[in-house]
Structure formats: C-alpha cells, structure tokens
C-alpha cells in the first residue's frame, strides 16, 4: 500500500511537470485541436487565455483522477477522465451553469407523497439487473445547456418513461420549459428539485415539449395556453439509503435522484465512478436513475450525448455521489404496470489486448500509466513523439 501511495504521488507530480513542458508548442497544438473538435469560439483574446488556463488545470485534474482510478479502483471498469467539451470551463462556473439541484428539506408534499418499502413495491429478488435505457420506454439524452435546470430534465425524463409505460404510447419529451417558467417553488435556471416539479404536474399536468419548447432561460409562464398532455396523482420516495427499496422501484420505472457532480463528473469519459471519487454529502445535481447491476448504478444525465458514455454515467453500487439519498418518481392512480425493463445481459469476461495509447494525447497516455510506471504504447514512433517519452525518462532518472 505504501508503495502504491508513493507511486501515485510521484505520478501526479510527474504529470504536472510534463504538462508544464513547452506550453507554446504541444499545449497550444492540442488546444487548437480541442477548439476545432468542440467548436469553441471566444469573444476576446483575454477570454480565450482564461479558457486555455482552465483547460490546462482540468487536464491535470483529469490525469490525477485517472491515475487514482488505476491504482485504487476495485471496479471491473475503473472510471477514465480526460478532455471533453467542459475542459475549458472553470470548475466554479461548471457548478453554477451545469448543475442546479436544490434540497427540499423545508418542502412538504402533504397527501401527494409517500415513502415506500421494498415489500410495498413488490421487489423481485430474481431480477439481478435492469436497464431502461435499452427499452422503447425512454427518450434520448437531452442537453440542459448553461442553465441550472437539471431538476426539470430529471423529472421530465421519469415522466416520459412513465407515460410510455402506463399509456402504451411512444415516449416523447415533456416540457422542461414549462417547469422552469411555472414552478413557483423552484428557481428556474437557478435550481430546483424533482419533487417540486412533480407537485406542479400533480396540480396542473404537463404538456409535450413540442408545444412549449426549451429555451435555456427563464420566461413568463404560459401554461394556461395549453391543455395538459399528462397528469399524475402523487409521487413516491424511499427512506434515505434504502437500496432494496430503490431497486424495487427501479424495476417498475426510472427514478429521479440527486448526486454530487464534482470535478470528476466534469472530466468524466467512461467507466464506473468509485465511491471515493465524489462526496456523497454534497448533492448538487439532479439526474435519472435508469438501471443497476450488482456492481453499478446506471445514470441518464442531461449534458448531451457527447458527454460520458453517450450521455450516461455509471456509479459504483452503494451511496456513491449520494445517489441513494434523494429518490423520487411519479405515480398515477388506477393504472396497471405490466411492463418490465430489459435485464442487462450477463457477459462472460474475455481477455482484451492492452489499449493502444496515442501519446500525443498526454491525458490518455499518462492516465494509462500502469503501476510499473511506463506507458502502454503501440510503436516506437508514438513513444518518441509523445509526452510519454518525457515522463518515462523522468521515471528512469529518479528510479
């Protein structure tokens, strides 16, 4: 363990050293590639310089997180972090613009809310895994943009699936904009929670997005101009941390949950986020829980399909990122739910070749350093031209 701790610290320092080498050449070349890949444009040279510094800081954070995943990860697929569309965003701005969950500790739901147990929900012990994302009862991943409206996307995602389940009609988007504009117990783009969204739908119903489309900013409530397309009667929840009840509810429909979307979420690319990679006591983002296995929860996010695993993220089972603390779902009386999600197929593990690491991308390269302290590279050319060479030589000099 002491050896691993020392190696981890050394690799973090080494990566920081490597990233600081020759910033005028490789850093800026990669920066230009990043801008082209994600269509980035800046209003001024000063704004671009600030974005570039954010990019470098996020690279260091991503390399550090990837190294920790490789050393300490107990998952079969440790999380990987690296360059994505949020790499030029300061973490404080990321939290302000791309999260938005607010706790509802002072909010009461009266007779419209009930906490359920696994027994009441009719849990099936024989269902070892489910994945609603592989069914026709779920809509494609959406993008909230720079508006703290995650709470509207988490709640409408569950409503969309529930609507398809109980009516037999195709799943289609409900209006997140109606919730932003009309839910008085929330703060629009400045945050809210799924429970207050459900309260609104219980009292007023909700219309399809095609009638009241998303604008990414708060506007005047126009709900009275439309006839609701769907309405619910109540909402369900569970006692904080009751995994058995959560699984039982998830066997029936997708659920709205709150999580701590920290910097590891900002830099996430793939794999299973471990319990020690985010603080469960600091939930700040509303998302949709769509599946589980014996090792992970599967989450549908609202940052677009070009983030994470096609818009999804997997969290290690348990209370990783606080996922079991604030769970809710919509309920309509007098309906029969006979639909069940598709179980996730159990696959026999097969040996896979070592990944090919292109060392010109120092995050994928240095993030994939193994515990022996060298890069997995496919050929001498990539080794000679990449940052791995610099890091490898540094390791040789020290050891």
Image: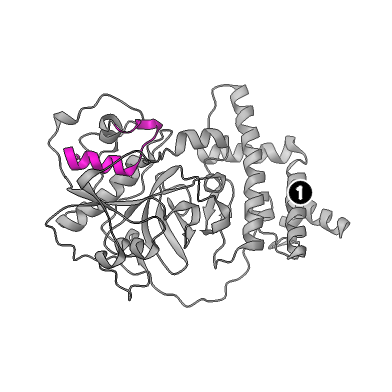
Q: Quadrant of the C terminus?
A: bottom right
Circle 1 residue: 13
Residue beneath the point at 26% across and 59% down: 136
Q: Which sits in the foreground, 4 or 106?
A: 106
Seen from the viewer's position, the closer of residues 369 and 325 is 325
Q: Quadrant location of the N terminus?
A: bottom right
Q: Which residue is painted at 54% across and 68% down in the image?
A: 76
* Residue for point 34% across, 46% down: 154
Please give the name of the residue rendered at 42% of the width and 37% of the height, measured from the top-left corner.
100
Q: Is residue 175 above or below residue 138?
A: above
Q: Position of residue 175 (x, y in %)?
A: 25, 38
By what rule are the colours in the image chosen?
A: one colour
Which x, y percent locates residue 145? 41, 36
Residue 367, located in which quarter of the rendered image?
bottom right
Q: Which residues are magenta?
A: 185-209
Left or right for 74, reference 383: left
């Amino acid at each position: 363990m002491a050896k691993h701790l020392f190696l981890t610290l050394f690799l973090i320092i080494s990566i920081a050293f490597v990233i600081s080498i020759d910033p005028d050449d490789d850093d800026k070349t990669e920066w230009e590639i990043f801008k082209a890949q994600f269509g980035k444009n800046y209003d001024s040279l000063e704004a671009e310089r600030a974005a570039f510094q954010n990019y470098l800081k996020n690279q260091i954070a991503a390399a550090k997180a990837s190294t920790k995943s490789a050393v300490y990860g107990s998952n079969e697929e440790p999380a990987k972090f690296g360059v994505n569309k949020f790499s030029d965003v300061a973490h404080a701005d990321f939290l302000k613009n791309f999260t938005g969950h607010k706790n509802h500790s002072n909010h009461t739901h009266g007779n419209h809310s009930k906490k359920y147990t696994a027994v009441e929900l009719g849990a099936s012990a024989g269902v070892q895994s489910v994945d609603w994302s592989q069914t026709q009862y779920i809509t494609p991943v959406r993008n909230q943009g720079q508006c703290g409206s995650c709470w509207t996307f988490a709640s409408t995602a569950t409503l969309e699936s529930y609507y398809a389940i109980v009516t037999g009609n195709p799943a289609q988007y409900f209006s997140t904009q109606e919730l932003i504009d009309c839910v008085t117990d929330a703060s629009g783009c400045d945050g809210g929670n799924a429970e207050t969204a459900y309260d609104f739908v219980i009292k007023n119903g909700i219309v399809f997005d095609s009638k009241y489309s998303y604008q990414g900013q708060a506007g005047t409530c126009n709900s009275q101009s439309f006839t609701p397309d769907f309405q619910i009667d109540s909402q369900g929840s569970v006692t904080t941390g009751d995994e058995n009840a959560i699984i039982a509810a998830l066997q029936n429909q997708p659920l709205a949950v709150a999580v701590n979307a920290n910097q590891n979420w900002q830099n996430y690319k793939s794999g299973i986020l471990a319990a020690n990679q985010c603080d469960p006591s600091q939930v700040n983002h509303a998302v949709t829980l769509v599946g589980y296995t014996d090792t992970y929860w599967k989450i549908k996010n609202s940052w677009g399909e070009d983030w994470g695993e096609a818009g999804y993220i997997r969290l290690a089972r348990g209370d990783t990122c606080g996922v079991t603390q604030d769970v809710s779902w919509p309920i309509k009386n007098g309906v029969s739910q006979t639909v069940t999600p598709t179980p996730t197929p159990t696959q026999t593990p097969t040996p896979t070749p070592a990944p090919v690491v292109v060392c010109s991308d120092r995050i994928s390269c240095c993030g994939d350093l193994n515990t022996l302290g060298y890069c997995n590279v496919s050929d001498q050319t990539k080794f000679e031209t990449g940052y791995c060479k610099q890091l490898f030589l540094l390791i040789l000099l020290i050891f």
